[in-house]
């Protein structure tokens, strides 16, 4: 456990105590109080689950964080805890809806694998949250797949993002995600695969780097994930677009989308470079959220260090 030196007020925290504190602090950026089991799951170092609760209790006893019931947070806010408690019922119904929409998405041309992502995948959901999807597309047709799905959403769902929010698209031949950080690792490790288990496993293998950020996360079960299916209508449409016109349209939609995002969205040079590559899409809203969360984490960490005399790294 942490010790206070004889001639200083510095509170020396062990590596595990720092890991626990940093985990709770990171999720404070989302407004998510955590249970001890969740703290262990998202801790940035390999540690025993049995050591988490003693570390949390020590933090609470020294005024470094707050506890309400079985939840721990950097804020003494009962409303945040109530929101977490209410999320269970909302999550159950939304998971069912997400799987229904996943079945629909799987029938679209060039879609090869689907995962549920976002708050719903992490179990931190509210009734107002979107259904967010991570989609792996056929090589060379990623932007065309996105255009067809967006067209369906605009025409038949009246552009309703809540039930058809496609956060990420990845090329099935270029599965490794280039922006390697805690936010992205958390996104990838919490994906809920719902279509094409084999390709999902390839994706996990291509992104083993995420384990360095979250070494205690257990592999996601793929027992109930459906295999890749053959849909005659989809195959026919893909056959048409596999001609030269398909490649031309794919490049056209890529250029048009990136141009629109550059004009209307606040996106970084790094995001533009990834979009220009064509092998990976991070929708600007996701890129901005990533920046905001990581920036809030750094800001909160610096504020904590200024307020408390500890050796927190």
Image: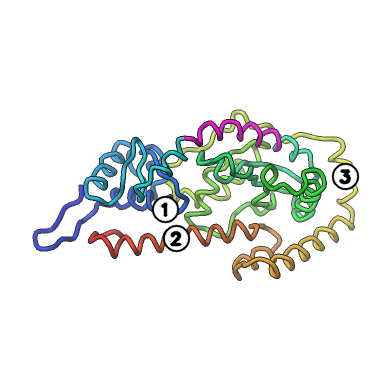
The residue pinned by badge 2 equals 296
Q: Image check: 199 left or right of 18?
A: right
Label 2, label 1: how far apart the Cα atoms are: 8 Å
Tell me which label, 2 or 3, sits earlier in the chain: 3
Q: Position of residue 54 (x, y in %)?
A: 25, 40
Residue drawn at (70%, 33%) of the image? 100
Of marks 1 and 3, which one's residue comes earlier in the chain?
1
Q: Mark 1, residues whose alpha carbon is within 10 Å: few (<14), some, or many (≥20)?
A: many
85 sits to left or right of 111: left
Residue 242 drawn at (x, y percent): 86, 51
x, y percent for residue 199: 66, 41
Q: Which residues are magenta?
A: 86-101
**Residue 95 inside the magenta-drawn segment:** yes
Q: Dot 2 surroundings within 10 Å: few (below 14), some, or many (20 or more)?
A: some
Residue drawn at the location 53% of the way across and 31% of the way down: 89
Is there a contact, CB below 8 Å, between mark 2 and mark 3? no
Look at the numbered disc 1 and give the secondary structure of its residue: helix
Taking 259 as reference, is 164 above or below it? above
Spatial CA distance of label 1 from label 3 is: 45 Å
Q: Which residue is mark 1?
A: 26
User: Residue 8 appears in which quarter of the rendering?
Assistant: bottom left
Which-is-in-front pick, marks 1 and 3? 1
The colour scheme used here is rainbow
Q: Is label 3 in a helix, a strand or a loop?
A: helix
Q: Comparing marks 2 and 3, which lies closer to the viewer?
A: 2
* 37, 125: nearer the viewer: 125
Which residue is rendered at x = 87% and y = 51% of the image?
Answer: 241
Q: Which residue is mark 3?
A: 237
| Residue 260 in the image, given as x and y percentages of width and height | 74, 66
Q: Is residue 254 above or below residue 38?
A: below
Label 3 near label 1: C-beta < 8 Å? no
């Amino acid at each position: 456990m942490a010790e206070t030196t004889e001639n200083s007020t510095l509170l020396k925290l062990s590596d595990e105590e720092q890991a626990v504190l940093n985990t709770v602090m990171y999720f404070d950026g989302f407004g998510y109080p955590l249970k001890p089991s969740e703290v262990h799951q998202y801790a940035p170092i390999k540690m025993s689950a049995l050591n988490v609760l003693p570390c949390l209790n020590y933090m609470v006893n020294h005024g470094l964080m707050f506890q309400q019931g079985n939840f721990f947070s950097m804020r003494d806010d009962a409303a945040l805890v109530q929101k977490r408690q209410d999320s269970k019922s909302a999550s159950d119904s939304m998971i069912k809806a997400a799987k229904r929409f996943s079945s629909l998405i799987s029938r679209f041309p060039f879609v090869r694998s689907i995962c549920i992502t976002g708050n719903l995948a992490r179990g931190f959901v509210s009734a107002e949250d979107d259904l967010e999807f991570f989609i792996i597309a056929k090589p060379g047709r990623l932007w065309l797949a996105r255009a067809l799905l967006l067209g369906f959403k605009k025409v038949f769902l009246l552009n309703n993002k809540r039930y058809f929010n496609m956060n990420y698209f990845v090329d099935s031949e270029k599965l490794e995600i280039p922006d390697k950080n805690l936010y992205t690792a958390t996104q990838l490790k919490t994906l809920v695969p719902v279509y094409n288990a084999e390709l999902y496993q390839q994706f996990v293998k291509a992104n083993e780097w995420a384990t360095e950020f979250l070494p205690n996360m257990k592999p996601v079960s793929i027992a109930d994930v459906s295999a890749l299916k053959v849909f005659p209508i989809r195959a026919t449409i893909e056959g048409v677009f596999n001609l030269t016109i398909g490649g031309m349209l794919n490049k056209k939609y890529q250029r048009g989308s990136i141009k629109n995002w550059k004009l209307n969205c606040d996106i970084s040079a790094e995001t533009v470079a990834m979009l220009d590559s064509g092998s990976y899409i991070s929708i600007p809203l996701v890129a901005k959220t990533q920046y905001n969360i990581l920036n809030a984490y750094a800001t909160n960490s610096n504020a904590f260090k200024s307020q408390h005399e500890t050796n927190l790294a």
